[in-house]
Image (cartoon, grey):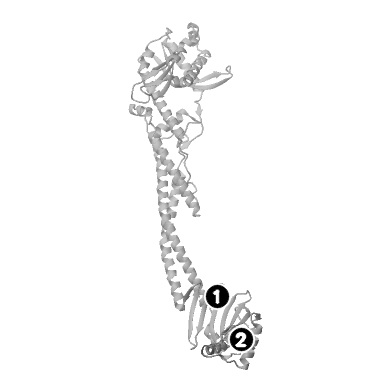
Amino acid sequence: MDITIITLTVGLITYCFFRSIKAKSRVKKVELSDTDKEELNKLEKIAGKQLPYRFPNKRGLAFQIIEFVRPGYIKRRIFDRNGHCLFLIKYNLDRTIAEFIEFGATDGHYFRKTIWNEKDEKNEFYQNNKQQIADFSQIKNKLQYYRSMVQEKRAEVLPVENDMKQYANELENHAYYQKEWVKRDKITDTEAIHSLEKAEKLDFDKKRDLRRGLQARNALRIGAINSGFKTYNKKVENFQKRMSDLHLGKIKYLHTMDVLSDHDLRHASNLLAGAAAEELVNKRIKEVQFGKVLIHNLILPYPYEKQTKLSNNQIDHLVIASSGIFCFETKARTSKNNSYDMLKDYGEIADQVAKHKESIKYVLEKSNNPLIINLLKRIPSIDQLIRNVVVVVSRSEEKFSLEKIERYQRVGIEVCQLDDIQSLLGKATECIGLQPEEISAIGEEMTNNKALEEEKTFSENILLFEDEMNLDEKAVDEQLYHANQVIKRIDHIDNLLADYLSGAREWRKLYQQYHYWKKFYDQVNNFANAESYYEQHQKDKNILDRI
């Protein structure tokens, strides 16, 4: 026998039995027949016990529990082999069915309930959690409504998602070509100054740029670029974190740029000012109209530790003239109250010029040139041949005086300003009287030694953008372009993300509703027909025998 028919038959008998008693109880006291009393006694004995469900079925029904609930009805629950209740039937005492509830196979909250009143009128509704629906067609309408809403919202979200992917690809392309802003390996002064000049768009052949290079605010563009890259870094960090938090994955080539610290900016400014000051001194020396040899940025070996080792020593300007060898050390300084206290720098400057003098003496004394050998024999002392000069160049347009230079003078160091160079070179305090051929020989000896040495590198120096000395304005602008494009696309993606997340949340919410109603629809759509169950019970009301 089909399980549905059998189940309906059993339920119907109980339903009819209970319904008659319930109806009578409302009008008058129910009088039970001997047969009714006997059946109720049997029910009381088996109430609450697990009974086998012997009818063949396709839904895995395995056992049932019947309870007599005084004063009005009998409750019967039918379970599958997993202990899940699939049917609950309430019978009136006249064996008619008062309620028939059919549960879903997986979720007890999904069910259909059918209720009969005293007039045998049927009211049927479906319940999903706490929401009741009286008509199955309403479930279908809800399902169709949410399906269309999900499709409509998805149609809005997908284009935004595609735009976001496009901007992310463009962002990654620009990030791939983005080079480092600062290189922090050991770098020579020349390399660092070259990159600073290019980044700042300075041309020291122009007087205007020379003056700007000296000023305290000579690295304005570098500062602006550095500030821009700080903004860039902040955007990149926030963007990558947001992408990670949303489980969208980080952009592979997008990373923060190394930026200049305040110390780096001050050092860069000083390097630029020093280079501009040296160029001003170089131009002023060239203006002196008499025979001389001028060597700019001369690097000579420096002997120490009894000449067992050689280091490098850089001289800003070496002038070889008839009045002697002038070793210039250039300093760019900012005056205070139109004066500058030279004692501040004495320790540093005295050490530098002493090394300059020792380097020049070392080169001359080891020379094999007969002119130089005879010159050293001719003069009383090689120290009289070499004159150390410190040129202090103002970093402002205002004129200033040099204070406390006596200590320099006591150790043979001359201190002057830019305007004093011509008169300094024009007169000789010592009557050395170098001959033209001797001037040439000394210049050649210095140049030959320069070719043998390399410029020192400094760990605090920085190089902007490039690893090599091919940095130009185009390369700088290209880096800024890529950085700006990265920021532009991050902003685009951030805006799209806001729209996307808003739309995606709404879409997911609609999808959950759609999934919710689809599950409900599938459950109630697969319910057995309660009418067949009811009809079968009307034919056979002897439920006790069936049990």
Across and down, in percent, residue 502 comes to 42, 59
At mark 2, the secondary structure is loop
Residue position for label 2: 1
Residue 191 vertical placement versus 108 (above, below): above
Q: What residue is at 36 percent from the left and 13 percent from the top?
A: 423
Marks 2, 1: nearer the viewer = 1
Residue position for label 1: 104
In the foreground, 423 or 373: 423
Q: Label 2 amino acid? A: Met
Across and down, in percent, residue 479 comes to 42, 41
Across and down, in percent, residue 526 comes to 53, 77
Q: Which residue appears farthest toward the front when viewing the image?
A: 29
Quadrant housing the C terminus:
bottom right
At mark 1, the secondary structure is loop
Q: What residue is at 61 percent from the left and 86 percent from the top?
A: 1
- The crowd level at tag 1 (other Cα within 10 Å; few <14, some 14-19, many 20+) is many
Pick whichever of labels 2 and 1 is earlier in the sequence. Answer: 2
- The crowd level at tag 2 (other Cα within 10 Å; few <14, some 14-19, many 20+) is few
Residue 331 vertical placement versus 23 (above, below): above
Q: What residue is at 52 percent from the left and 85 percent from the top?
A: 531
The CA distance from mark 2 to mark 1 is: 23 Å
- Residue 208 picture quarter: top left
Residue 282 can be seen in this image: no
Residue 342 vertical placement versus 246 (above, below): above
Q: Label 1 amino acid? A: Gly
In the foreground, 219 or 38: 38
